[in-house]
Image (cartoon, rainbow, N blue to C red):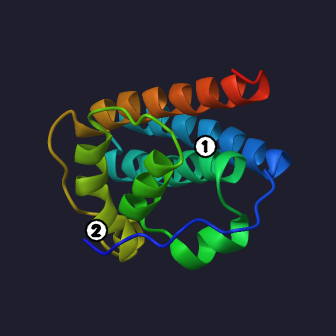
């Protein structure tokens, strides 16, 4: 596992972009829940992967990094994004690593568009949706604590 680079020396929270990422993630989670109910697991899991990335970066934009830095250091790497978010004080859901371990390789190589016929373990889309909803709650709680200085 490659070592993480230090956060930028100069940092100012980007609350508007952080909130935009957060709200976009919630929309992706809604679409994931709908797709899972339709047994469209690939579509659901693609939305979950995008929501995960947006939520982790939302936290980072408030706590430690800039959009340019995220683009350079993280790109679309869910594992690296999660590691940086944890370093920046976000307590990740315990089962998020298992979701990322399943989704990241497929997401990283564009597999959701290229290999739409892939099958996923039964119930994985629903479980992943619940776990990433928990992540959304943790990001929201952390943002509220930061906003109120506690």
In the picture, the disc for residue 105 is 2
The residue lying toward the viewer, choosing from 37 and 33, is: 33
The residue lying toward the viewer, choosing from 1 and 137, is: 1
Question: Residue at the location (40% across, 55% down)?
Answer: 83
Is residue 75 at least partly visible in the picture? no
Q: Quadrant of the C terminus?
A: top right
The residue lying toward the viewer, choosing from 109 and 37, is: 109
Above or below residue 62? Residue 53 is: below
The Cα atoms of the two marked residues, 2 and 1, are separated by: 20 Å
Is residue 18 at least partly visible in the picture? yes
Residue 140: image location, x then y, percent: 63, 28
- Figure disc tally: 2
Question: Residue at the location (36% across, 77% down)?
Answer: 109
SS label for mark 1: helix
Above or below residue 35? Residue 5 is: below
In the picture, the disc for residue 111 is none
Tell me which numbered mark, 2 or 1, is placed earlier along the sequence: 1
Above or below residue 130? Residue 92 is: below
- Residue 105 falls in image quadrant: bottom left
Question: Residue at the location (43% across, 67% down)?
Answer: 77
SS label for mark 2: helix
Q: Give the side of residue 97 with respect to residue 51, left or right.
A: left
Q: Are marks 2 and 1 in contact (CB under 8 Å)?
A: no
Query: What residue would you read off at disc 1?
Result: 25
Residue 69: image location, x then y, percent: 65, 72
Q: Give the side of residue 130 with respect to residue 59, left or right.
A: left
């Amino acid at each position: 596992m490659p070592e993480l680079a230090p956060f930028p020396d100069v940092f100012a929270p980007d609350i508007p972009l952080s909130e935009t990422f957060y709200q976009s993630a919630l929309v992706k989670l809604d679409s994931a829940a709908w797709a899972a109910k339709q047994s469209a697991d690939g579509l659901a899991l693609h939305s979950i992967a995008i929501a995960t990335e947006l939520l982790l970066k939302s936290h980072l934009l408030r706590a430690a990094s800039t959009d340019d830095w995220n683009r350079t250091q993280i790109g679309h790497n869910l594992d690296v994004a999660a590691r940086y978010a944890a370093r920046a004080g976000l307590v990740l859901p315990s089962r998020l690593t298992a979701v990322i371990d399943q989704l990241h390789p497929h997401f990283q190589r564009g597999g959701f568009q290229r290999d739409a016929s892939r099958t996923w373990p039964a119930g994985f889309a629903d479980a992943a949706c619940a776990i990433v909803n928990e992540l959304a709650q943790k990001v929201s709680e952390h943002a509220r604590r930061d906003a109120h200085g506690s």
